[in-house]
Image: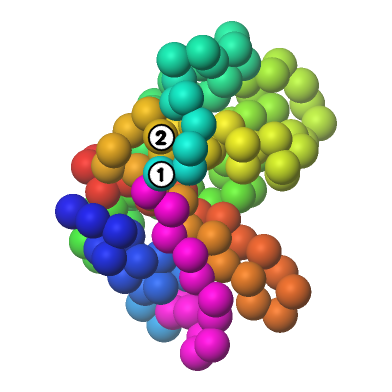
Amino acid sequence: MSAATARKVALAHWGFAQKAGARAPHGVELKVLGECGTSGLDEATAPLQRFAALVDREWPEYVGTLGKYGRLGLPQLQRLASQAQGDDAPADPEQVEAWVHCLVDAERKCFLAVAVHRSVRRLLLINLGV
C-alpha cells in the first residue's frame, strides 16, 4: 500500500462520493502526502489527541464501497475538530490541516490528498488500512 494507491483512491472518490461517476475532472492538480514533517502525535496537545481518537473511531463509517479504503473530507474533519475542541463553531481549515498532517505522520497507512481545481482547495484524508 503506497502513495500510488492513495492517489488512485483520491481520484476515483473525488471528495468522498458514493458512485464512481463522481471521478475527478481532467486537469486536477493532486498531491498525495505520506509524510508531512511533523512530530506526529508524540507532542500532541489534548485537543489534538481527542481529534485523533475521534478520527480513529469514525473510520468504519467512511469506508467506500469500492476498494474498502477509508476517506474523510474536509467537512467531516472540521466537524470532528470542533467536537475535539468542544466548540459549536466550525473549526478553522488551516488548523484542521495542521492536525491532519500530524495524523498522517503518526499513522503510516494514512495519506493526505490535496487538490486544487478552479481555485477551490480540497483535502481528503485516506486510510488504506481500515
Which image quadrant is residue 27 in? Answer: bottom right
What count of labels does the image hold? Answer: 2
In the picture provided, is 66 more to the left or to the right than 100? left
Can residue 65 be seen at all in this image of the molecule? Answer: no
Q: Position of residue 68 (x, y in %)?
A: 23, 54
Q: Which mark, by number, is residue 65?
A: none
Residue 63 in the figure: left or right of residue 97: left
The correct choice, above or below, for 72 with respect to 113 in the image is above
Numbered tag placed on residue 35 in the rendering? 1
* Residue 32 inside the magenta-drawn segment: yes
Taking the magenta stretch, the answer to whether it contains residue 26 is: yes
In front: 104, or 90?
104
Q: Residue at x 58, y 32 (%)?
A: 99
Q: CA distance from mark 1 to mark 2?
A: 5 Å
Say which of 73 and 97 sits in front.
97
**Disc 2: which residue:** 105
- Horizontal side of 68 relative to 64 (left or right) equals left
Q: Position of residue 25 (x, y in %)?
A: 52, 86
| SS category of the residue bearing label 2 | helix
Q: Earlier in the sequence, mark 1 or mark 2?
A: 1
Quarter of the picture containing the C terminus is top left
Question: How far from the left and from the top, in percent, is residue 20?
Answer: 36, 77
**Where residue 123 sits: x, y (%)?**
56, 56
Crowd tier of the residue under label 2, counting other residues whose Cα lies within 10 Å: few below 14, some 14–19, many 20 or above:
many
Can see residue 122? yes
Left or right placement of residue 91 versus residue 61 in this view? right
Give the residue displayed 31% in from the left and 70% down from the top: 8
Instruction: Give the residues in magenta.
Output: 22-34
Three-letter code, disc 1 = Glu
Q: Look at the numbered disc 1 and give the secondary structure of its residue.
A: loop
Residue sitting at x 62%, y 42%: 97
